[in-house]
Image: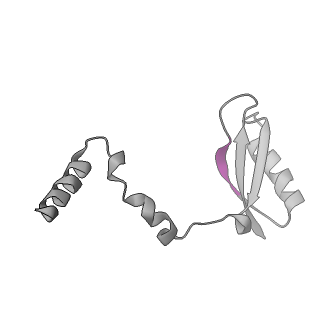
Amino acid sequence: MAIYEVFLKKDGRDEYRHAGALDAANDELALVMARESYIRRAEGDRLWLVNREHVLVADPDFIAPNADKPHRHHDGAAVAARRKAAREATE
């Protein structure tokens, strides 16, 4: 059995949205089960299934450099603190 993530989209609207997950023995059965479980009430016009074995998961160390971006904080406190520390270090 494999776990499939289900994504749905209304034609001409928004983007694909995660609708849920299901277990199926193969790709064909997964499509049938997704149709019966998620499309019966016209929740979407388009369907994507992704086998969880094929999902790429980023390592936390790979993502870490993006955590230190004080210029993205809206209140400016982090940027001001960094500039103050830099000034004090050069004095």
- Name the spot of residue 55 as percent of width and height, x first: 68, 63
What residue lies at 76% left-to-right and 68% top-to-bottom? 2
Residue located farthest toward the left when viewing the structure as drawn: 91
Principal secondary structure, stretch drawn in magenta: strand
Residue located farthest toward the front when viewing the structure as drawn: 91
- In the image, taking residue 47 as reference, residue 60 lies left or right, namely left
Q: Quadrant of the C terminus?
A: bottom left
Q: As rendered, which of 9 and 2 lies closer to the eye?
A: 9
1 above or below 88? Answer: below
Colour basis: one colour
Locate residue 69: give its quadrant: bottom left
- Name the spot of residue 67 as percent of width and height, x first: 40, 59
Locate residue 90: give its quadrant: bottom left
What residue lies at 76% left-to-right and 33% top-to-bottom? 42
8 above or below 20? Answer: above
As for residue 19 lying within the magenta part, the answer is: yes
Tally of marks: 0
Residue located farthest toward the top when viewing the structure as drawn: 12
As for residue 74 lying within the magenta part, the answer is: no
- Which portion, as a residue range, is magenta? 16-21
What residue lies at 20% left-to-right and 59% top-to-bottom? 86
Q: Quadrant of the N terminus?
A: bottom right
Q: As rendered, which of 75 and 46 lies closer to the eye?
A: 75
Q: As rendered, which of 28 and 71 lies closer to the eye?
A: 71
80 above or below 28? Answer: above
What residue lies at 73% left-to-right and 66% top-to-bottom? 54
- Name the spot of residue 74 as percent of width and height, x first: 31, 41
- Name the spot of residue 30 as percent of width and height, x first: 82, 57
- In the image, taking residue 64 as reference, residue 52 lies left or right, namely right
